[in-house]
Image (cartoon, coloured by chain):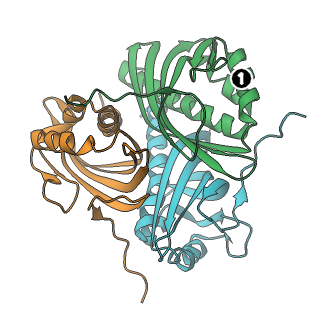
Chain colours: A orange, B green, C cyan
Amino acid sequence: VEAALQELIDRQKIVHLLHEYCRGLDLMDLAVVEAVFSPDCVVDYGAKPGMRTESAEALIEGLRALMWRWVRTAHHVSNEQIWFESADAARAVSYVDAWHEFPDGTTTTLLGQYHDRLARTADGWRITHRRLLMAGSEGGWDVPNHRLERQAPPP
Amino acid sequence: VEAALQELIDRQKIVHLLHEYCRGLDLMDLAVVEAVFSPDCVVDYGAKPGMRTESAEALIEGLRALMWRWVRTAHHVSNEQIWFESADAARAVSYVDAWHEFPDGTTTTLLGQYHDRLARTADGWRITHRRLLMAGSEGGWDVPNHRLERQAPPP
Amino acid sequence: VEAALQELIDRQKIVHLLHEYCRGLDLMDLAVVEAVFSPDCVVDYGAKPGMRTESAEALIEGLRALMWRWVRTAHHVSNEQIWFESADAARAVSYVDAWHEFPDGTTTTLLGQYHDRLARTADGWRITHRRLLMAGSEGGWDVPNHRLERQAPPP
């Protein structure tokens, strides 16, 4: 396969991975979520203890503890962008609109960006580093995520 | 065309089809919507009589009856995933954020997933089976869609 | 590179451009935004003076004047569709869910479509014409954008 075709195939596989994360998480099928990450992945969702994990196992344990707080979620991902650093390493930015429903029926939505590093492993592309940056929220989002910062306004 | 390239082309055409559905429906250009489906498509939008149709013609008739209830809609589709079952058959999952405006200016939004089967026909890729699964909603959504179910919580 | 592969590469580059616009705008990194457009681009965001510009320079000046009204924005783009008119010219439609936060913490969201024309230039693909069409909004959106019109209802 020539290089240009291989790059398109890699892009497709990486975008598919970003979507697998959402599909698995919204089903609470955490085996699907775990398969998206390398075993030694570093994931940083925010400033509170437990929100930064240094293995897929710790990440899944954290999600299992956190996510049952809501009865349903829907992680809509868009604006997927990928930059290759080599044939086997890439960075990705994607936007997420993450809707969450509490047991009492109230809802809250996080708007943010995933900033990922990915590597081609023996098992295919995997996320090795993920950082979530919150642009904003609707409806009383209370998780202390890192903030996405605009450039400074003109003086 | 070699197989890997053909698969990327097919993926692009299928994603385009998922987007044509939204574009046609939001314009109420139902000829565009109809061209997305095979003549014998089975579409299941929910549990009420009329929400399951067994032909493109019946689907379009149902949409024509239903959609003028709102004065405007916007179907934002994301998280498109495709799995090929053969060179000529595929399954797809995509997320939808479907905003609807009533004549009185109030709005309601459905969050869900389309679960599709597609086939390559003489006219190109067409959806042959579609099932909508609702994750949740905002603003008083009152349509009895099927529900997307999470896996059972830990005991 | 054969034609079918080149078209897929072009599609990827154009979608990347649509996403660069959002990423740059949400960071208020207007150099990123400017690089998305041809120098002589015609951009029409609405019916008020200043909302239609005839150069990238005027567009950026307009965005710099407008966007600091909000403290944060998040432009989620989806439903990207591209039609080629020649090897070097294309039309694109994409959907946008554009969330905006005011300094007092209130938020408003525009739902709409970008209708673009693009050309392959010496610097790669660039948007040469952009028109924004508003499907609707949430939360007191007050910008006089052009409206997206459904087809006429049945008599």
Instruction: Count neighbours of disc 1 (C-alpha within 10 A) and say few if under 14, some if 14 to 19, many if 20 or more.
Output: some
Q: Quadrant of the N terminus of chain C?
A: top left
Give x and y (percent) for residue C2: 45, 31
Q: Name the amino acid, label 1.
A: Gly
Looking at the image, how many numbered discs can be counted on the residues?
1
**Left or right position of B82 against A91:** right
Give x and y (percent) for residue A125: 22, 36
The single residue placed furthest to the right in the displayed view is C155
Give x and y (percent) for residue C65: 56, 80
| Looking at the image, residue C12 lies above or below residue C75 | above
Q: Is residue C120 in sight in this rendering?
A: no
Instruction: Return the residue nearer the eye: C19 or B50.
Output: B50
Q: Is residue C130 in sight in this rendering?
A: yes
| Looking at the image, residue A141 lies above or below residue A79 | below
Give x and y (percent) for residue A66: 22, 45
Q: Quadrant of residue C146?
A: bottom right
The single residue placed furthest to the front in the displayed view is A104
Q: Secondary structure at mark 1?
A: helix
| Looking at the image, residue C144 lies above or below residue C103 | above
The single residue placed furthest to the bottom in the displayed view is A155
**Left or right position of C151 against C12:** right
Kindly identify which chain the residue marked by label 1 belongs to. Answer: B
Q: Quadrant of the C terminus of chain C?
A: top right
Q: Residue at x 46, y 27 (%)?
A: B147
Residue at mark 1: B62
Instruction: Return the residue nearer the eye: B112 or A151.
Output: B112
Q: Quadrant of residue B36?
A: top right
